[in-house]
Image (spheres, rainbow, N blue to C red):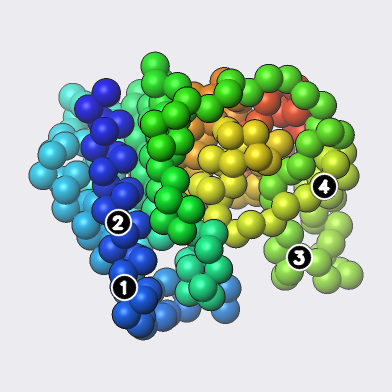
Amino acid sequence: MEDLKLAGELVREAGELARRMLAEGLETYHKTSISDVVSDADHAAEKLITERLIGERPADGLVGEEGARRAAAPDNAERTWYVDPVDGTYNFLSKLGIWCSAVGLTDSHGLLLGAIYHPVAGELWLGGRGAPTTCNGIPVEPLSDAPLAKLSIGSYLPPSRLTADRVATLQPLLSAISGAATLRVIGSGSIELASVAAGRIGASLHNQTLPWDWVPGAAIVEAAGGVTRVIEHHKERWHVAGNRQAVEEISAALIQR
């Protein structure tokens, strides 16, 4: 699949550019909070990806985390690329090794493909519709059903909502997490979802996930035989991924609240 090959090249080039820039020193800026950061590497890597997409897929739309936007051509079946040039920027700038470059593509039928490159581990994840998930070219084992109680779950507990007067707003999340064997908070949504596809993490659950944090990894989970689901409940939007049984259990726990 030419799109998947292109996506793999893009994330590898962007990830290596970000790694070089980190080694040379970076300017850092805060967006919405002290932990919501962006650097010159984010902007440079997004520019690298989007300029090539504009050149090689001129009719496709694109949405980048750092502001790149272009609508798909009217007759192009709503093909849109989602770009996360450095996913896990807080980890990246803190010299923690869990960060990546990620690209995903959707069309009028939904998720089409995902590509995730984890420079520190040297892992390139590719997968999509009709293309089973691989890591460095090696197919992963298809996900099989397993109960949540025997699995880890990846998620995030926002500190601002852990205060005594606000923790009740997290009850659906806490209810779902409590059914898992253990919790993992790793700080990169795409690496977390790639880890779900590989069976390293059993399931993933997040609230109000942005599309560039969801599309690349969700496509890879589905290509590994897993299930992804977006649940709207009580004005909240939950993103769930994992094997079918675990996703059903998490979904049930969320809507009970």
With 68 as the anchor, is 133 left or right in this view?
A: right
x%, y% of residue 99?
49, 59
Q: Above or below — where is 65 with respect to 140? A: below
What amino acid does circle 4 point to?
Answer: Thr
Residue 240 appears in which quarter of the rendering?
top right
How far apart, in angstroms, are the residues tagged by discs 2 and 4? Answer: 33 Å
Residue 213 lies, with reference to residue 233, above or below; the image says: below
Whether pointer 2 and pointer 4 mark residues with C-beta atoms closer than 8 Å, the reply is: no
From the image, tell me which residue sits under label 3: 161
Q: Give the mark, 3 or 2, whose residue is nearer the N terminus.
A: 2
Q: Name the residue located 32 percent from the left edge and 80 percent from the top edge.
A: 24
Q: Measure how far apart labels 3 and 4 are at the Cα level.
A: 21 Å
Residue situated in front as seen by the camera: 235 or 90 = 90
Q: Which residue is mark 2?
A: 14
Q: Which residue is mark 4?
A: 182
Question: Foreground mark, 3 or 2?
Answer: 2
Of labels 3 and 4, earlier in sequence is: 3
Residue type pointed to by label 2: Ala
First in sequence, mark 3 or 1: give its number. Answer: 1
User: Can I make out residue 67 in this image?
Assistant: no
Q: Residue at x 83, y 71 (%)?
A: 163
Q: Give the numbered dot on residue 21.
A: 1
